[in-house]
Amino acid sequence: MKVKIPVVALGLAAVLALAACGTGDDGSDGGGTSSGGSGAALTIAKPDGAIATESNNPFVGDASAMKLGYINALLEPVGFENLVDPTQETQPWLASEITWNDDYTQLDLVARDGVTWSDGEEFTAEDIAFTYQLLKDQPELDNAALGIKEVTQADNTVTLTFENSMYAKRDKVIHKLVIPQHIWESVDDPATFENLDPVGTGPYTLTNFSTQSVELSARDDYWGGELAVPTLYYVSYNDNTALTTALANGDADWAQAFIPNVDSAYLSKDDANVYWAAAGLGIDAMFMNTTAKPFDDVAFRQAMNLVVDRSKHQQIAREGGVPELTSVTGLPTPAGDDFIAEEYQGENYEVDVDAAKDILTEAGYTWSADKLVDPDGETVTFELSVPQGWSDYVTGISLIADAAAELGVDTTLDTPDSDTWWDMKTTGDFQAILHWTDTGLTPYDLYSDIMDGRWLAPIGEAADYNFGRFDSPEATEALNAYATATSDEDRAAALETAQQIFVEEVPALGIGTRPFIAEYNTRNYVGWPTEDDPYINPDPTQPTASLILTKLTAAN
């Protein structure tokens, strides 16, 4: 196994000294069992390396505001869906009333009164209508492929009509961030607009951007009432280790990141520290470039699926911090139990090297000096790529490399910086990567992200998902049938087809569960979502983060 690691740039965020972060008004340093006071800043952190150039465009996935998550404190959606507890009803937000028709092809949104934009302009139903009309007129901005057929407005009610049922995409519809018409209607190209002076309805405004940190300040005219936290800092540490240190010593307060040895490294440092891995339907998967060797051969993908050890990934890469991925359908359990087709009930991932070798032999593979040789006589090798500093992913690909070695396959591990890796994965310039899938109210997102033709883009052009360019009209048809079905029976039949394709054709390898991981502390603020009160998912990078920010209150 070869390891290719580039020179690592210094993480500028790692040396930040934000005096207000992690300390209370009483001057405590955040250690032990100290408690803070109101007025302390809140630092929200990620382990992605130095912050890139500024962009506050909510339609561009690699914009700084999207990657760091601060867009969710500036802009707000019409409502919130609780992906931790999908049984809860939709919570209205910028829409005071949210009403679906029976087959989820039409949605009525009543604009909330008394809301103002951060520049003082009144928020109206026109803003909601403009936002969704923009998604209709420029579908390249609609990465959820909502298929909006019509947007109409009558007084303060906006009606959205869809080409198909939105049952499987309800959260994607509801969580679209609403933008101000009076700003964006004059933008020539919304896909490239940097939005350097962002205007939003959210609880905070952008007051400073630098490559070291992003500062947001609480609005004193926020429609949702007074805010407990006066200042937010968004920083990006160089890697998980640096972020863990910051969380442990109180320099960072809220994060969504993997922490090795979470008990000793974080929880034991302060009784106020909290780690919560809320269940969901997302996973970590090994996306494989199915357009080129060796992963263009389903036999090789099937063989790899049989040698990867998911229990080792859970125990070593994730250090027991998340549940193991067991079902061959790729669905996390127990969250996904109700969605597993009858033929796959109780069928779990098991390592079987002999069975993997039998598949390869039957497909024409041979071995020379213990190295795997493909039917064309070429030695099989491949490269695994994940960003430097993502310690769980780096360990994860090392374990996959060990598994490949069981088949006589040599691998190279590539750990570029996160920006380089991001470009590689979207343009298809890789052989294998670890990456997450979205989660949702149903398994649709998991399977769509991996094998849906709606994401397909030629190699060299950016794809939002289906990074491996898995091209299966049958899978695309099944996923579309699931998303547009108007009965439980039709949805079940379509999902069964999609699961069969996932299991038999292995468009990606399910590697591990990906719950909504979050770390935060209660030194200065309480009101966080918890296992006992799972009112929303705790991830600070999601559109639901603004709900949490409005619920926080001073600990003292």
Image: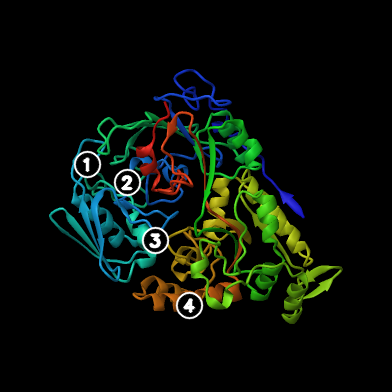
Q: How dense is the environment of label 2, judged by Cα within 10 Å: few (below 14), some, or many (20 and up)?
A: many
Label 1 vs label 3: CA separation? Answer: 27 Å
Relative to residue 16, is residue 204 drawn left or right?
left
Element at label 3: loop
Element at label 4: helix
Label 4 vs label 1: CA separation? Answer: 45 Å
Where does residue 72 sit, x and y in percent of width and height? 38, 44
Label 2 vs label 4: CA separation? Answer: 36 Å
What residue did someone put label 1 on?
115
Between disc 2 and disc 1, whose residue precedes? Answer: 2
To which quarter of the image does residue 528 belong?
top left
Relative to residue 412, is residue 73 drawn left or right?
left
To which quarter of the image does residue 132 belong?
bottom left
* Disc 4 residue type (three-letter): Pro
Label 3 vs label 2: CA separation? Answer: 17 Å
* Disc 3 residue type (three-letter): Ala
Between disc 1 and disc 3, whose residue precedes? Answer: 1
What residue did someone put label 3 on?
144
What residue did someone put label 4 on?
473
What residue did someone put label 2 on?
76
Specify whether residue 261 is in view. Answer: yes
Label 3 vs label 4: CA separation? Answer: 19 Å
- Which label lies toward us, 1 or 3? 1
Where does residue 480 sit, x and y in percent of width and height? 41, 73
Residue at 40% x, 42% y: name it: 55
- Which label lies toward us, 4 or 1? 1
Label 2 vs label 1: CA separation? Answer: 11 Å
